[in-house]
Image: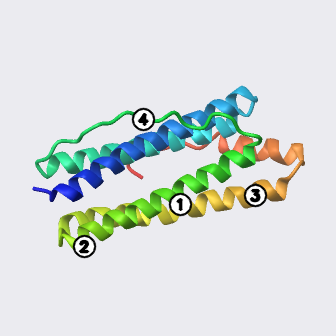
Amino acid sequence: MLDKQLLEALNDQMNHEYFAAHAYMAMAAYCDHNAYEGFANFFIQQAKEERFHGKKIYDYINDRGEQAIFSSLDAPKVEFNSILETFEDGLKQEQNVTRRFYNLSEIANEKKDYATISFLNWFLDEQVEEESMFERHIDYLKRIGDDCNTLYLYEKELASRSFNETE
């Protein structure tokens, strides 16, 4: 049985993961609309990963004998000025998620819920990878700048990205 405060925080994070997927789909839609199919694929795969994270929290809540509670999702940002902006927004979103998992970890530590502490460690490790990935893509896009040929090649690389739930 989970402490009430911790359960509420886990439910809130689960919903936030689904919101993140929603936001990444909005970024994909921007990319598709502007004929950047490779970048759209990147964000679609990112959305799949966020839904996987939400389901992982959902399963954990249920495994602990509690009920996952879903709430409504806000509309995500849908207007962007550039591909670079979508990645910068993605990084901000991941940094926010990292802060949220830090807060969840603090609650779990305060409640001495060692199972939840162990569970959250996977997400903390995952967030290091997520932030690093977005920082790397932002660096690449800044270096590419207005070089259409290089952007085309980079987009083709991202078109091959896929998400596998065993990751």
Q: Are marks 1 and 3 in contact (CB under 8 Å)?
A: no
Label 1 SS: helix
Residue, disc 4: 73
The residue where tag 1 is placed is 95
Q: Is residue 117 left or right of residue 23?
A: left
At 63% from the left and 34% from the top, the residue drawn is 78
Please say if the residues under marks 1 and 4 sit with CB atoms less than 8 Å apart. Answer: no
Q: Is residue 28 left or right of residue 17?
A: right
Secondary-structure class at tag 2: helix
Q: CA distance from mark 1 to mark 3?
A: 19 Å
Q: Nearer the viewer, mark 1 or mark 4?
A: 4
The residue shown at (61%, 42%) is 42
* Mark 1 Cα-neighbour bin, 10 Å: few <14, some 14–19, many ≥20: some
Q: Residues within 10 Å of mark 4 (few under 14, many from 20)?
A: few
Instruction: Give the spatial CA distance, label 1 vs label 4.
Output: 19 Å
- Residue 140, given in percent of the width and then of the height, sits at 75, 58
The earlier-in-sequence mark between 1 and 3 is: 1
Of the two numbered discs 4 and 3 on the same chain, state the one appearing first in sequence.
4
